[in-house]
Amino acid sequence: MTTDNDGLMRGEPASPTGSALFVSIAAALGGFLFGYDTAVINGTTGALETQWGIGSVETGIVVSSALLGCAVGAWFAGSLANRIGRPKVMMIAAIVFFITSLGSALATGPVDLTIWRIIGGFAIGAASVIAPAYIAEISPAHLRGRLGSLQQFAIVLGIFGALIVNYGIQASAGGASGEVPWGGTAWRWMFAAAAIPAFVYFMFSLNIPESPRYLVAKQQLDNARAVLLKYVGGNVDHKIIEIQGTLDSDHPPRISDVRGSRLGLMPIVWVGILLSMFQQFVGINVIFYYSTSLWQSVGFSENDAFLTSVINSVVNIAGTILAIYLVDRIGRKKLLLMGSALMFVALGTMAVVFASSPVDAENNPVLSDAAGVTALIAANVFVFGFAFTWGPVVWVLLGEMFPNRIRASALGVAAAAQWISNWLITVTFPELAQTGLFLAYGLYSLFALISFIFVWKMVKETKGIELEDMEDLERHGLPST
């Protein structure tokens, strides 16, 4: 399979559906990197604390540092893609992630590991933005929703892949701090293994066509026509005219687009911001960043803690598949309400278990067999409740709830709020956990309860509403039930 100088592929499936599916999967591998990077740190935290003698605050900084890079990468990815093209941004992201994976594996201390993770975050942030944008631009209209969901599915597969690899490496070494049979410390190989999906992503990026929107913007109309014919189908000349009309009216995202009467922003933008914040404030990333060390701290063996994290990831995948099936059947709002209620119960159960258990000298709860099983079940119920509701549904809403004229700007503001919220939860968990795990999970449970009230009062159902009709949400202020 090769790519010619015009950005067209030779040797791919002939039908638009099959071709679009292939390139969408290729682009969604950026989501796989996103998920992989989210979870790869999970298996290393205990070993890093032991080897370098760092405390909870330093651990939180190392773990969360990549998120700062993600925010920067996501912010600049769009403008860079408009200059050099979508696949080239994917290639750059793959190269950067490949290099930083090896750099993280060779880190000599928490400072240089933090630097490598921040730089790697640039790549992850860029990939997380370019993939859904590219898929939307290359997909036939009747497949766009399903193909767009591949991004979220790739993220959870990336999380699962990282946890499986971490589990296998630590098992071969007898722990994350141990030496693997082929030489080197286990936690270093966990980071190094991330270079493999980065290489695969690069190779796929070499073999996908340029976005027709980019080609039209660069006045390469013949190339755009060929891409549309092969991957989209239909009346391609009419489609080119539509793209040209959109380009004529587009302008770079500006913060002034979303200004309004509610604390400086439009009401609908605040809804998007709060959706993004609550998605993170329920503490989901604590599970994927810290679950291995968490389960060890409450009495699980290191091997069982790694296995438990893998089980969490399988549950996450199952919930995401269910969400893809339900989101256009049940609707967005009902799923969010169901998720908030389920997460409130699960998180509250974990808080009660941790609060009612005796603690050791390091203030970690010591769970009985029954309490351990209860906490494990509650954690998986929480993951499942998030995976089939708030995980994918928030992204669906953010992509469709804003009026056309502010969509890009509003999405940028909401995404920034999400990265910052993710960072806040990630960096504060170690200190909260040191005070008491019941405090951390009690706080996340409270946020789940508030999110239920927020959705009930402020979020309007968008299932079956045309994108052009979303203007009503902005015109009438905060949506009601």
Image: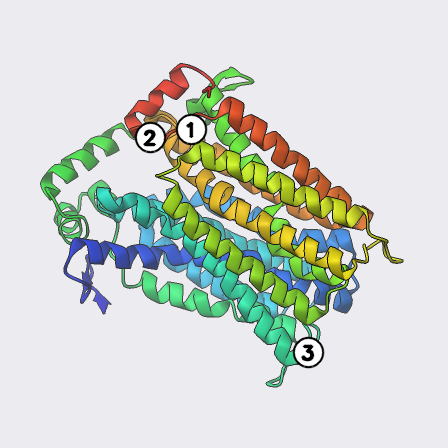
Q: Give the image's coloring scheme.
A: rainbow
Mark 3 vs mark 1, foreground winner is 3
What residue is at 57 percent from the left and 64 percent from the top?
Answer: 310
On the image, the x and y values in percent for residue 220 come to 17, 47
Mark 2 vs mark 3, foreground winner is 3
- If the image is split into quadrants, where does the N terminus sit? bottom left
Q: Disc 3 marks which residue? A: 174
Tell me which amino acid carries mark 2. His
On the image, the x and y values in percent for residue 318 come to 46, 55
Tell me which amino acid carries mark 1. Arg
| Residue placed most toward the observer, 308 or 16 | 308
What residue is at 29 percent from the left and 29 percent from the top?
Answer: 466
- Rendered view: 24 above or below 204: above
Marks 2/3: CA distance?
Answer: 56 Å
Quarter of the rendering containing residue 175: bottom right
- Crowdedness of circle 1 by 10 Å Cα count: few (<14), some, many (20+)? some
First reached walking from the N terminus: tag 2 or tag 3? 3
On the image, the x and y values in percent for residue 360 come to 87, 58
